[in-house]
Amino acid sequence: MTIRVAMTVNGTEYARDVEPRLLLIHFIRDELGLTGSHWGCDTSNCGSCVVWLDAKPVKSCTLLAAMADGHAVRTVEGLERDGELDPVQQGFIECHGLQCGFCTPGMMMTARWLLDHHPDPDEAQIREAISGQICRCTGYENIVRSIRWAAEHPRNTP
Amino acid sequence: MVAHCPGRPNDAYMQVPAHVEYERATSVEHALSLLSRPETRVVAGGHSLIPMMKLRLAQPELLVDINGLAELAFVAKDGDQLRIGALARHADLLESAVAAECFPIFRDAERMVADPIVRLWGTVGGSLCQADPSEDLSAAFAAARAMAVIKTPDGQRTVPVREFHLGPYETVIGRGELLVEVRVPVRPGTGSAYQKVSRRVGDWSVAAAGAVLAINDGVMQEAGIGLTAVGAEHFVAAEAEEFLRGRAPDEESFSEAAKLAAEHCHPVADQRGPEDFKRHLVAELTARALRRAAARVSP
């Protein structure tokens, strides 16, 4: 049995007939082919799968695609604008905020949300914001620096 | 337990829930009628239910999504009650100034529920209805003597949170019923606090204790003590509460109450620690919560 699920992802409308049990992360990756969002622990612990649902980050392995029907999703592919990287993405480049890169898309989606609400976060606020996400390479130091870099280099245009 | 993942090599497997139907509730009445069907579960945040469905620990036939019921998403003070809608997110309760003013115990507890992303989605009602013995709000609401408001096909009923849980993962909510709200009585001269020890950010409690004290004329008129993850009946330290009632809020009373709380709970040894360690935590955290609650009583 399938149901019709329609949602806007990074500004583009998509509709698919899917099983109600399909998880949002698999809808994004396997149905839409947007493989920037990573499917990690499958238990809502690691945060690799974080995307935005409407204006809030969510662990997309713990949400049914059906629950996002009619809503707007933003993934890591939707961070750049007009070919220009988001300051968060640039920060991860400048500060070497990734090694294997698996946690990176989720980290960046959470970082963008943090900076939209707290444009000048201190280290403690950054660490708190990403505390539901796991990185096994960096020891978090460079991720924190990357997000600070983004805070110090906001995009010029609104 | 695992399903083949379409579009992937044959050796790639993933956890998926079993087949399930999905409906969106458009009103509380609509939700109640959908919930009249057997093997139906409410989904809101889904952060406990969906992982359980992946593991086949839960296998509902129908999910009723109540995320659209905005009328259940509120935290507000109404006369002498703090009212919290079942669909209020953990982040809403954490950030509520009015809740923090009358019951800082909830802010204390919410700061340590899961992680910031999960708190944006997980709901207060979902936490209570999941009835996990390690869940923090159950003990906090029990300490505050909160009431659960349940819509039924015939109207509604109100159940003390202290009678809401029948056991692990089991509540008094019946078929065709929906928890819609939690009401916490606000008394003058009240102070409250919650103290938790967990192994790392986002983890369940090893043990936790919440205290709500109503102090008048230098005497504890009422004391509520909630315990998390240590097998306390109804999440409550009843003997310690009984002991405190009518006494002065001093160190001697608090340490005796802490001892009683540790004696009368039933922790089980698991990967989070042995039984004696958990009893030690209960005593220490109860004493700390009582001290902090007393210090927070506004004159």
Image: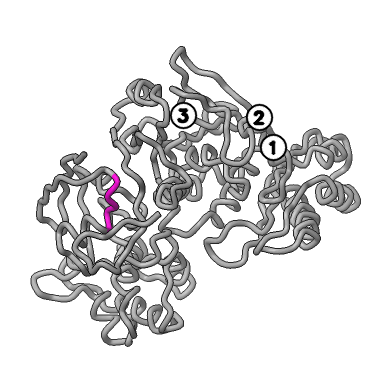
Say whether marks 1 and 2 touch (CB < 8 Å): yes
Q: Which residue is mark 1?
A: B234
Left or right of A83 on screen, residue A118:
right
Question: In the figure, is residue B119 to the left or right of A72?
Answer: right
Dot 3: few (<14), some (14–19), or many (≥20) neighbours within 10 Å? Answer: some
The answer to whether residue B73 is left or right of residue B202 is left
Residue B287 % position (x, y): 79, 54
**Discs 1 and 2 lie in a common subunit:** yes
Q: Secondary structure at mark 3?
A: strand
Rendered image: mark on residue B163: 2
Q: Which residue is mark 3?
A: B180
Residue B297 shows in this picture: no
Horizontal side, residue B142 vs residue A46: left or right: right
Give the CA separation, mark 3 to mark 2: 16 Å
- Label 2 residue SS: helix
Q: Tell me which segment is drawn in magenta.
A: A21-25
Q: Indicate the chain on which mark 2 is placed.
A: B
Whole-percent x, y for residue A27 in the image = 22, 55
Decide whether residue A24 is among the magenta residues. yes
Judge depth for marks 3 and 2 and give the one in front.
2
Q: Pointer 1 indicates a residue of which chain?
A: B
Looking at the picture, which amino acid does disc 2 mark?
A: Glu
Residue at 43% over, 50% down: B47
The amino acid type of the residue labelled 3 equals Val
Determine if the magenta segment contains residue B230: no
Q: CA distance from mark 1 to mark 2?
A: 7 Å
Q: Residue at x 76, y 54 (%)?
A: B282
From this viewpoint, is residue A45 visible?
yes
1 or 2: tag closer to the N-terminus: 2
